[in-house]
Each structure stands twice: as C-alpha cells, then as structure tokens.
Image (cartoon, rainbow, N blue to C red):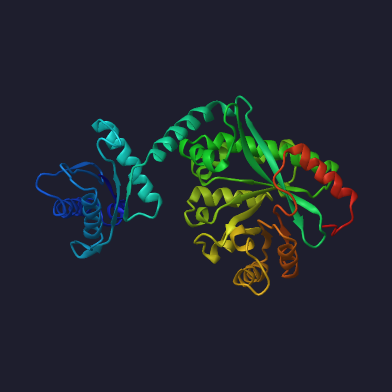
Amino acid sequence: MFLDLDRFKDVNDSMGHFMGDVLLKDAARRISGCVRDCDSIARLGGDEFTIILGELEQIDSVDRVARNILQRLAEPFRLGNETAYISGSIGIALYPDDAMDIDALLKNADQAMYAAKNQGRDRYHYFTALMQQKAQLRMRLANDLHGALRRRQFLLYYQPIIEFASGRITKAEALLRWQHPSMGMVSPAEFIPIAEDTGMIVEIGDWVFATAAHQVKQWRQTYDPDFQISVNKSPVQFRKQTFEKNQWLKLLQELDLPGQSMVVEITEGLLLDASNVTRNQLLIFRDAGVQVALDDFGTGYSSLAYLKKFDIDYIKIDQSFVRNLVADSSDMALCEAIVVMAHKLGIEVVAEGIETQEQYELLKAMGCDYGQGYLMSKPVPVDQFAQLLATASKSTPNAL
C-alpha cells in the first residue's frame, strides 16, 4: 500500500511544522493500529507512508485494512489547542500479479494512489494494467511534445461564435490541435495537462496567441473590421510568465491591432487563486483593451465579486447547462438567471455547446448575446473557417 495524507500541507502552513510533526506521529500510530504485528510500515518522506501486508489468504483482508486506515485517519487530530481534519488516499499493488520486484510494486502502488486522489481523496484504489498503459502513453506524449512546436505539428482550429442579434459570425474561439506523426490527432484533453505540468504550455501558448493574432488581422481586413478571436490562457502561463517577458501586447502593436481584436479566456479557478502577478496581468490586459472571458461559467467556485473586481467582459455559460436546455427546465432557469445577472453587471454572455435549433431559439429569446456550438459549426481548420466567413458575408442577417 502507498498512502498519502490529504491536505497535510494545510496543517503545516496554518499551524507550523512542529504541529505537522505531531500529526505525522499520531497518524503513524493510527496506521499501526490497523495492521498486524507481522506487517511492515514505513514513512517514506513528507506525508507519504508505505505498508506491506504479507501472507494474506484473501484479497478481502486488504479491503478491510484499507477501510480501517481511512476511517482512523478521518477522525479529528488534536494539535495543542487546535483540531485538524485530514484524510488519506491509498494505492494498492499486489505481488506477483502487478509486479515482481519492490521498485515496480512501489511505482504501481503510487500510480494507484494518484488515481484515488483524482477520484476525490479519502479512498483507496487498486493498480490496474490500464494505469500502466496510461503512464506509458503520458511519458511518450511528454517526450514527443518537446519537439512538436519546432516540427510544426500544432494546428489552430476555429469555432465560430454567432451574435444572436444579427445572426452573424462576429467572433471565433481558437482551439489547439496536435497532429502527431504516428498517433494522428491527439486530444487536447490528453496533451494540455502534460504541457502544463512540464511548463511547455508557456511556449505553446505564445505560439497560439501569435498565430491567432496574425489570423484576426487578416479576417478584420477581409470580413469584419471588428472581428475578434479568443484564445485560452492556462493558469500555468500566468504563474510562470511575468508580463514583462510576455510579448503579446508588443505583437499586437507590431501588427497595428487594437487590444479589442483579441479575447483571453480564463477559468474561474484562476480568479480564486489569483496572485499579485495574475492580478497585474489581468489589469494590464484591461488597460490595453484586450478583453477577458470567464470560461465554463457555473461549474467552478467563483465569487461574483470577482466578476467586477477583474472587469470580466464575457462569461461563457458551460455546455453542461446548454446540453439539456428545453423550455421550463431547471437548466432554462439557470441560463436565464446567468444572463440577467451578467447584464446587470455590464457583462455579455456567450452560450457554449448549442446543438439544436430549440436551444438556439431559447437562448436568443432570453437575451443571451452570443452562441457557439455544433449547430453552427464544429471547430474547423483555418481554410474551412474562411469559407464559413465568405458564405456568411453573402447571406442575409439572421440566416441561421
């Protein structure tokens, strides 16, 4: 078993390392009380423990031990005059089924522990062959990502954003795609987290912005002088990139583009965790005229006060609210409430994930400002998007 204490860092940060050590000793005693004398327990470092259970006749014994440990760790810890509450995440690997040597067993149990954390913590998870496959794929993608930008394997797809009032395409969201030489098109859900973990997202994000900026200049000249492209900016980019080193605004000046030509999409979590560096970057964006959109609105833990504090220009209703949108539904009430609240704050609203004509008409009727989704178009390469613009420029407003 590989065990990691959840939220232990919070105890160290709030109560000090001395109290953290007291908690570790108490945790060790509690774990020891859940196993036999013939079993082995060790603290590997920090808040990580390993437990070796030998000579087991039934796998059910492992389940029982894991449940007992989690139950004991969930009980309150008395630390001086304070009380702390933590939990544990446990990964389990079995010999000889999962590995034949101790290093491989530890590695596999560690992977299983992270699976337990990802599923919500305070639980245990067995190692599976699928985890091994995912770990190997992740390593391969991480290695191949290093040369992907240099080898020009990245592409930008664009998804149109329709203005409800006119029915015209007035904006587009730029979406990153990776054309892997042997694996084909790799899902952003697979490679973006790796790029963030390795820090490569900063260089990739700069390329995305530069490519989109050059593209919006062309479309403003040929289609609509007020056309906008939005790009997603990762929280990792804010943390690892001081604005003085960021060339985004300098590039807009070189291209003779106003700030309003670009929209930066951020997540709700970024606002809640905003450091001074992040705040300063958002304020500099605002002062330069670059607009900011809050993506996936309604799925996080945002404080409404942050919407005005950071001068958010757009909020994007998450597609989970739009997907099942029908008249007189709870999703309908939620979307209407978001639109009314945003407009009271002087913020415009974009609805994502529109797939049916009914959803389109309901959102338009409730006063939503913009919409995007497969009903209008899926994300497409630049040449196909140019064809959409050319067709739209010849059609009458509200042709949709």
User: Which corner quadrant of the image does residue 44 belong to?
Assistant: top left
Q: Nearest the camera: 76 or 307?
A: 76
Q: Residue at x 24, y 48 (%)?
A: 59
Q: Nearest the camera: 303 or 158?
A: 158
- Provide residue 238's location: percent of width, then percent of height: 53, 45
- Provide residue 143's location: percent of width, then percent of height: 48, 28
- Provide residue 377's location: percent of width, then percent of height: 74, 49
Observer able to see residue 168: yes
Observer able to see residue 247: no
Residue 56, placed above or below residue 154: below
Q: Residue at x 75, y 53 (%)?
A: 376
User: Which corner quadrant of the image does residue 370 belong to?
Assistant: bottom right
- Provide residue 220's location: percent of width, then percent of height: 81, 44
User: 370 left or right of 71?
Assistant: right
Residue 363, placed above or below residue 32: below
Q: Residue at x 64, y 62 (%)?
A: 322
User: 106 left or right of 264?
Assistant: left
Dividing the image into 4 quarters, which one contains the C terminus?
bottom right
Q: Nearest the camera: 339 or 53?
A: 53
Question: Residue lying furthest bottom in this view?
Answer: 328
